[in-house]
Image (spheres, rainbow, N blue to C red):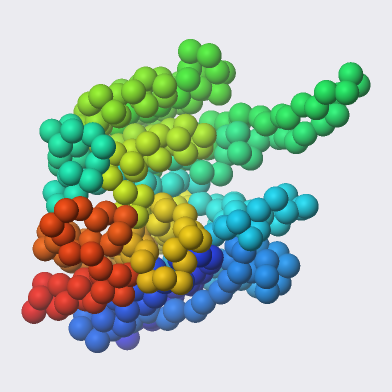
Amino acid sequence: MPANKKLLFLPGDGIGPEVMRQVRRVIDWMDRKRKVTFDVTEGLVGGAAIDAHGTPLTDATLADALAVDAVMLGAVGGPKWDNPTDYMKRPEAGLLRLRKELGLFANLRPATVFDALVDASTLKPEIIKGLDIMIVRELTGGVYFGEPRGIEELPNGERRGVNTQVYTTSEIRRVASVAFELARKRSNKVHSMEKANVMESGLLWRQEVTKLHQEQYSDVTLEHMYADNGAMQLLKNPKQFDVIVTDNLFGDILSDEAAMMTGSLGMLPSASLGAADANGNRKALYEPVHGSAPDIAGKDLANPCATLLSFAMALRYSFNLDDDAKMLEKAVQNVLGGGMRTADIMAPGMARCSTTVMGDSILRELDKLSS
């Protein structure tokens, strides 16, 4: 009998525990109805870990994360932990450490517009109807990690803040390879975005992506685009894109822009993947794009769909359960098509529901789809 699949739950702060509770319910459903069993352990991260242990990520929790097949994270942060005296004790520092120690260099951010939510976007329906983009963001290099960095006092009394944008050949090639591989399973087109016109790191990025394409992925269409133009084109003609690969800073910005094109951050999942081992398995962390939303925490108002769709990505990329992933995605789509809405995606004529009721509805839909 195959070993159970191992998951670490890190609910985190704010609405994290509420949305993660709905994932637990789907896991229980899969155990009963699909005979797919997960060994789930749980730990603290972010503000919750600071309160309990004085650090946003303990060594023990990190060890747990390294030992499982995948990590599911809710959300971190909140005003309670703003402006700490120690910069490395921010809630977000725990997430950054997880990404770094697990080697999660490729962040996958799909931007998909569900037909039922076309009117939720601020863009015209004809621009975004049927939109299905995958943004692949390099996650462990670039300006967020480059050295030197810091704030220093200058002799003239001024202060100077320094961050360094830096990339190596191997960092660029490995994330570009993930993008090309994904494109082969989608529409076979990659747009690589950087600022090669004004940044040496961008020029290296363009050169190395081009070289890798010529060597291994010439069957995939590759186009280069400056990141500022890419931001404009995402709003002007988003359906020209299939897979976008870009660096850490531009990926941070472009993926949030793409997210809001879909109408709500509450609908968008993400995956962060490491390098494949000898068996093809990767360290992985899955999390919703939305934040901790402390203003609605504990009120059963949060939209659990992004977290459930993140779990669907885990089923697909970490556990090779593509049929189950599609079923969960279809269940979410069908519930939305039936008019159920949490507050963040509410629209006239729809039925407003709580976090729990949205979970109930998705479980009922899973029952229908699996029968």
Left or right relative to 358: residue 106: right
Q: Is residue 176 visible?
A: no
Which of the 4 quarters of the picture holds residue 151?
A: top right
- Provide residue 125's location: percent of width, then percent of height: 15, 37
Q: Does 213 sit left or right of 52 as displayed?
A: left
| Up-down relation of residue 30 to residue 127 (above or below) | below
Residue 71 drawn above or below residue 233: below
Q: Residue furthest top?
A: 197
What's the residue at 59%, 66% (across, down)? 45
Residue 222 at x, y percent in the picture: 30, 26
Q: Where is the C terminus found, in terms of image quarters?
A: bottom left
Which of 75 and 200 lies nearest the eye of the viewer? 75
Q: Nearer the viewer, residue 277 or 331?
A: 331
- Quadrant (top left/top right/bottom left/bottom right) for the N terminus: bottom left
Q: Residue at x 41, y 21 (%)?
A: 228
Q: Position of residue 110 (x, y in %)?
A: 31, 46
Near-viewer residue (14 or 188): 14
From this viewpoint, which residue is outermost toward the right? 155
Residue 72 image-quadrant placement = bottom left
Q: Is residue 350 above or below residue 168?
A: below
Q: Which residue is at a point 63% across and 60% down the rendered structure image? A: 80
- Left or right of 230 on screen, residue 100: right
Residue depicted at 73% across the width and 54% down the height: 84
